[in-house]
Image: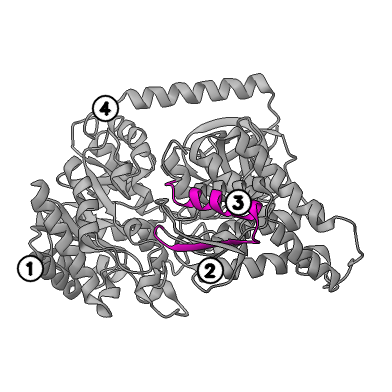
Amino acid sequence: MGELRGLGVSPGRTAGPVIRMAAAPTLEGLILGEGAKPVAGGVGRALGAVAAELEERARRAQGEAADILEAQAMMAADPALAEAAEEHVKAGLAVPHALDAAFAAHREALLAAGGYFAERAADLDDLRNRAIAAALGLPMPGVPDPGHPFVLVAEDLSPADTAGLSADVLALVTEKGGPTGHTAILARARGLPAVVACHGVLDLAEGTLVSVDGGTGEVRTGLDEPRAAAIRERAAEDRARLAAGSGPGRTADDHPVKLLANIGSAADLAPGAEGVGLFRTEFLFLGRRSAPSFDEQVSAYARVFEAVPDAIVRTLDAGTDKPLPFLGLDAEPNPALGIRGLRVDRLMPEVLDTQLAAIARAARATGARPSVMAPMVSTPGEAARFAERAAKAGIQRVGVMIEVPAAALLAAEVLAEVDFLSIGTNDLGQYAFAADRQHPGLADLLDPRQPALLRLVRLCAEAGLAAGKPVGVCGEAAGDPRLAPILVGLGVSSLSMSALSIPGVRAALAERTLDDCRREARAAVTRKEG
Amino acid sequence: MVERTVAVASRTGLHARPAKLFVQEAQRLGVPVKVRVGSGKEVPATSMLGVLSLGAVRGTEVTLSAAGGPEGEAAVEALAALLARDLDASDG
């Protein structure tokens, strides 16, 4: 029995056959024009294979998904595309390069059309990769959909890949990636076990049966189907047992810990949470050429407030790190260190003023009392100015996110200006360790169990206890059943996570007394780095 | 030469499902029909990528054209009727 080990980033156990996602083909190293023999039907065969696969998937899908796949098949089968590529072949390009050039021209045309037509450029990129892979005789890139349950193995997963994951995916295992990357966040949101930074996993043969433990990071080979089925069965029982738990979060000795949900819109609301600890408002703004109107914002916020009157709304968290077309910000050499979050307000104060006014209006319309919090606050002065703006808009309860180490170090002073703090452990880790969240080689530094990160959390929690104000965690660490007790032991009063993570965290807290949590916290902050 | 200008009625514009139904119908008819917006570039009605590149949203006036004669006229008529319907409606 073989064993691989990576970082467990989304707990849960399962087992099934490995299916690898092929990487996008590269044209680098292929010489332009080489192999430009008039291979009969080279272009047509490649595009035909892509269209045929998409049609097959469309037949198995239903409703909107089937429409989308069918439309993509028609893009691949478009005679205009084949003609353009044939022209390039006649002009001397090899088939893969000819396909690349033909796709590039159509991509430009879609981008020029703007709006949601421009968003189809990503579909076209996917089709391009598939067509080139077909022309080169490589496996089709993109997320596989074999029609049976499987463990998805990839070098890394992009947001586009993860958006289209089929329900057959049992677990995710990637060779790269870190605890705060897309794979980890998506896996936790969907309740899928996941292991990242798992060296050697790409060497496993297609179809190998593996067991995956998304808690410990273990990936084992050498099991047979009955054993795999038994693991899946036990995992299903565990999930059912966790799901049966309910009620507010508390330790074994009844110390209350609010278990809140992170949501992006009213659609993410789910039973089981005691409230909303993080309402990300970016979704309203994504893919927009102009800011959403005041009225549009009011109705989106009101939908959430009707269900959760005391939701915590985070004002727009975008900037050069998460570019939004309507902001029109110039690219920066270090976007994570540039104009992002509350800092956007330095350039365009009207965005925040409109948003605060819309939140206040939605609150009045629904009789709700939401809180607002600002992302990327660095100083007590920034916190004070944000609190003043929110109060002027008519919002009673104001907090700030703690993601910048400078703000954590002055937690008491920051907290003097506002009603609560909410710690974003992902960004706080990235900034404390000077380690890019997306960097595949720095996963160990971004581990939320790092003692230095936990000590910054402790500074904030102690400031909260001293001031008698709540301090919560809304980063990914809050939804990890192994970390949640440590955070509680440090003095954190609420944990906000994707709704699917709540049962596991509730169970982890119920097994421990507050003293147990404190003991674990003390051990964690003094742990010797390996 | 026969021409017909019609406003796109589908909620999502000539995109996704409406674009799919339009292009499928054009392919089924088998008569060359061109589409353009205003005085913009003409694209074949049978080209999914061409039709998407028009960027036609709900209310955009789209001009269909074909060679004269009963066949061309019937094809333009059929496609214009399709555009004038809300193809996002569930009855298709």
**Chain to which mark 1 belongs:** A
The answer to which of marks 1 and 4 sits earlier in the sequence is 4
Mark 4 vs mark 3: give the one in front: 3
Q: Quadrant of residue A431?
A: bottom left
Label 3 sits on a secondary structure element that is: helix
> Label 1 belongs to which residue?
A392
Mark 4–mark 3 distance (CA, rounded to whole Å): 62 Å
User: What's under tag 4, amino acid-wise?
Assistant: Ser
Same chain for the residues at labels 3 and 1, yes or no? no
Give the magenta-colored segment's residue range: B58-86
The three-letter amino acid code for the residue at tag 2 is: Leu
Q: Is residue A492 above or below residue A289?
A: above
Mark 3 Cα-neighbour bin, 10 Å: few <14, some 14–19, many ≥20: many
As drawn, A474 above or below A222: below
**Where residue A446 appears, x then y in whole percent?**
46, 58
Mark nearer the viewer, 2 or 3: 3
User: Which residue is more in the foreground, B23 or A178?
Assistant: B23
Does the magenta segment cover residue B62? Answer: yes
CB under 8 Å between callouts 4 and 2?
no
Q: Quadrant of the N terminus of chain A?
A: top right
Disc 2 target residue = A111
Residue A246: mark in rendering:
4
Judging from the image, mark 3 belongs to the subunit labelled: B
Dot 1 and dot 2 within a common chain: yes
Mark 1–mark 4 contact, CB under 8 Å?
Answer: no
In the image, is A468 to the left or to the right of A227?
A: left
Q: State left or right for residue B34 relative to residue A489.
A: right
Mark 3–mark 1 Cα distance, whole angstroms, equals 61 Å
Mark 3 vs mark 1, foreground winner is: 3
* Residue A109 at x, y percent in the picture: 58, 69
| Residue A372 - label | none
